[in-house]
Structures are given as C-alpha cells and as structure tokens.
Amino acid sequence: MNSQFRLLGVAWYRQEDYDRCRAMFIDGEVLPFSYMDWKNQVERFRERCVSQGIGVIQAYIDPDLFPDWCVANGCNADADGRDTFASDLAGRVMMERSRLRD
C-alpha cells in the first residue's frame, strides 16, 4: 500500500465572489459564465481526483486580496496565477501535515 498522500490545490470561488473574480482575471472568459456551471464542473473534477486517490484542497480566491498576492508573487491574474496560488496552498498544507507527523 502506498502511504504517500497526494494533494492537489484547486482554485475555488465563493458564489458571491465568482463574477468579480471572472471580471478581474485576464482570461476570465475561459471560466464558465455562471457560478453554478463552474461549481458543477469543479465538483466533477474533484470526484475524479478523489477516485484516483488524490485529495483536493479548495484554494479560495478572494477578489480583494488576489491581485496583491499576484504582484507579491510575480504572477498574473490568469490561469497560471490561479494554479500557482492553489499549488502554494497545497504545498503549505502538505508541509504542515508532514510537520505534525514528525
């Protein structure tokens, strides 16, 4: 049995922030138009991950804070920036999990 726990950070949105996030992203048009369409899509993705033994961390993007995070981390407010943000959170969770096990 593989004891290695895999974790994936995924950009996540609150319903009340979704339209603002889409509007501020450089590539906002690539996201589903409605929150419910996005939510259905991301839930299917999460189910596929879980079925493959991959945990999913919901990396909530706050439209008031994300632009500053992007500047501080040399990212754009686009898919790459969202992925970096989510991966960073997943990495911090994994480090904390490892620290607590030691």
Image (cartoon, rainbow, N blue to C red):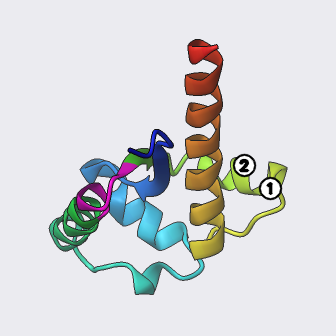
Which residue lies under the disc numbered 1?
71
The answer to whether residue 82 is visible is yes
Quadrant of the rendering where the N terminus is positioned: top left
Q: Amino acid at mark 2?
A: Asp
Disc 2 on helix, strand or loop? helix
Q: Residue at x 47, y 48 (%)?
A: 7
Q: Judge by depth and name the residue closer to the eye, 63 or 32.
A: 32
In the depicted structure, whether residue 76 falls above or below residue 2: below
Q: Residue at x 34, y 60 (%)?
A: 18
The answer to whether residue 61 is visible is no
Which quadrant of the structure image shows residue 54?
A: bottom left
Which quadrant of the structure image shows residue 25?
A: bottom right
Q: Residue at x 63, y 42 (%)?
A: 91
Quadrant of the rendering where the C terminus is positioned: top right
Distance from label 1 to label 2 (Cα)? 5 Å
Q: Amino acid at mark 1?
A: Val
Which residue lies under the disc numbered 2?
68
Q: Residue at x 65, y 65 (%)?
A: 81
Q: Is residue 52 magenta?
A: yes
Q: Residue furthest front?
A: 1
Span highlighted in magenta in the image:
49-55
Disc 1 on helix, strand or loop? helix
79 on left or right of 13: right
- Asked whether disc 1 touches disc 2, contact meaning CB atoms under 8 Å apart, the reply is yes
Q: Judge by depth and name the residue closer to the eye, 71 or 42.
A: 42
Q: Few, some or many C-alpha atoms within 10 Å of disc 2 (few <14, some 14-19, many ≥20)? A: few
Residue 3 location (% of width, % of height): 46, 39
Residue 95 location (% of width, % of height): 65, 30
Q: Is residue 34 magenta?
A: no
71 on left or right of 26: right
